[in-house]
Amino acid sequence: MSNRWRVILPPLVPFVVVTVGVEVLVRSGVIPSYVLPAPSAVFESVFRDFRELASATWSTTKASVAGFAASGAIGVLIAVALSSSRWVERAFYPYAVFFQTVPIIAIAPLLVIWFGFDLRTVIASAFIVSVFPVIANTLTGLLSTDPALRDLFRLYGASPAATLWKLRLPSALPSILTGLRIAAGLAVIGAIVGEFISGSGIGGVIDVARTQQRLDKVFAGLLLSSLLGLGLFALVNLASRLALRHWHASEQSR
Amino acid sequence: MRMTNRLIAGALLACALLPVGCKRQDANGTGAASANAPQHVQIALNWKPEPEFGGFYAAQASGAYASRGLDVEILPGGSGTPTVQMVGAGRAEFGIASADEVILARQNHNDVVAIFAVYQTNPQGLMTHAERGFNSIADVFTHPGTLAIQRGLPYADFLEKKYGFDKVTVVPNTAGIPAFLRDPNMTLQCFVTSEPLVAQKAGAKVKTFLVADAGYNPYTAVLVTRGDYLRSHGDVAKSLVSAVRDGWAAYLKDPAPANAVMTRLNPTVDAPTAAAMADAQKQLIETADTQKAGLGAMAADRWRTLIQQLQDLKVVTSPPKAEECFANP
């Protein structure tokens, strides 16, 4: 039990300190409530607008998970393709970087024209924002296979497919999981940006609340979106532990 | 153009407004003491320089500010610029908002006061394709189609309550005029002085309906300031309003000089479009009321009606008094 507290307590301390601090600053009038809402008002909004926020969060969850899954699958495939030869990497990697630098807000209205005002726009936005870290990390992992092991595989005449499947992908796994960890949070951000333009989910709620000058509800939306991001992050961490605990130093008991 | 996508998240907004305390002191500290040096004030716009703000730029060009000892800096805005919060937090002495925003702000204990109303008639409207042959705003809601509108705006709630949104598919107004041009069954929220002119230039035949004609008519493009600033710097506010009134009178007579300034600052509007916009908005600015009370003047009963409407829509639950929302300095 005391062990569990040692895990839970450290992140709780800054949370409590900041929450209480902001509450005091707003209540005493140092910060006006129309600039930053009191945390109590935010929690109140979470309860008062619970139904609306809950269904919005569910919609955002679906889109983030779908976008994140697409990033994971397509990102790894692209990285495998890029790692197949130096020439391919040189030719196509710059276009992968494009996904990293594209200002999603600028192309967001185009997404609506391409995909319409439904979940597909939101998923596409989540995908575009989160795919690059998967590509970059997977590629790094694939290219840093232990040369001795690679020689061993060659010596025994292993086919390229077998080398990929049995050597390069497993040894890239820690890097892939790092990419996925970054992608998890980004997918939520991407989904919310997509929702700003398609009008659903947490992004839609935030947009309307902002128009109504309901800062408490804006922050309630932000709170739920960060919880969602944390949830996805925790899932990736769990998967990472399960996948690596038997053999990789990063997940062995510290 | 006027109301396209609002994409800046609330978080960014709050961050931008956070460093508050010092600026407010600054605004109070200098004050009327420096009678010789021109008084520096800022006006935060909620959109890019366009004929909607013509009179403010005309007053600059004609020297109406300078002759009253004012050094006015006009800060162009963008989509979703939170001007009432900026003024309330002391980031600018003056700002442009709409009357319903003032009421919402006051409900949130943000002490902003309207002091000059550019549009006596609300220019917000719905733009349809002329081919659909609609005769009134009600037709928009009795025919299947798409309505692109920013949800959360009180007038969207008003239209929903009055006509119902059952037959139309409501989507956010994020793809703007390009989406309107592509979809013959789309209705787009607009400023009747702005988007219709752009859509027509792109080849569309449009028919627009004023929300004001449906019964929702808040003062729009309203100059606002903070209540305590109005009390401590009443003379500055009075001079500014008088200069702005002169500016608008000059702009209504000849928009060309101010348009030249604005089209340079905002090249997305070309000179002919600016001239057409200035012409289209005249009748919304100069009305029977302003001929008696002067340009920009406001009446308490208009504010009372609006407060009542916002209460009926449940947008406002603890309503402010009409008299505290505005002043005619």
Image (spheres, rainbow, N blue to C red):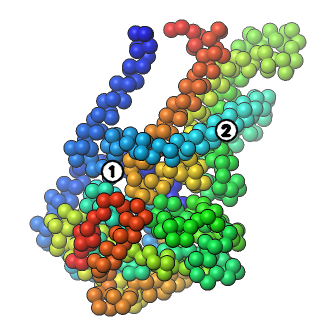
Measuring from the top left, give residue A230's x and y in whole percent.
Answer: 51, 30
**Few, some or many residues within 10 Å of mark 1 (<14, 14–19, 20+):** many
The amino acid on which the numbered mark 2 sits, given as a three-letter code, is Ala
Left or right side of B169 for A158: right
User: Quadrant of the rendered structure where residue A173 is?
Assistant: top right
Residue that numbered label 2 is attached to: A66
Badge 1 amino acid? Val
Q: Chain of mark 1?
A: A
Question: Which residue is located at x 21 percent, y 60 percent?
Answer: B27
The reply, left or right, for residue B326 in relation to residue B9 is left
Chain letter of disc 2 in the image: A
SS for tag 1? loop
Q: Would residue B244 be seen by someone viewing this image from the given angle?
A: no
Q: CA distance from mark 1 to mark 2?
A: 34 Å
Q: Earlier in the sequence, mark 1 or mark 2?
A: 1
Q: Nearer the viewer, residue B312 or A12?
A: B312
- Where residue A93 appears, as percent x and y from the top left, is 70, 37
Quadrant in the picture for the C terminus of chain B: bottom left
Q: Quadrant of residue A23?
A: top left
Q: Position of residue B215 (x, y in %)?
A: 45, 78
Residue A103 against residue A232 in the figure, above or below: below
Pointer 1: what residue? A35
Secondary element at image label 2: helix
Q: Residue at 51%, 8% (x, y): give it.
A: A254
Residue B140 bears which disc, if any? none
Location of the N terminus of chain B by quadrant is bottom right
Residue A243 lies, with reference to residue B124, above or below; the image says: above
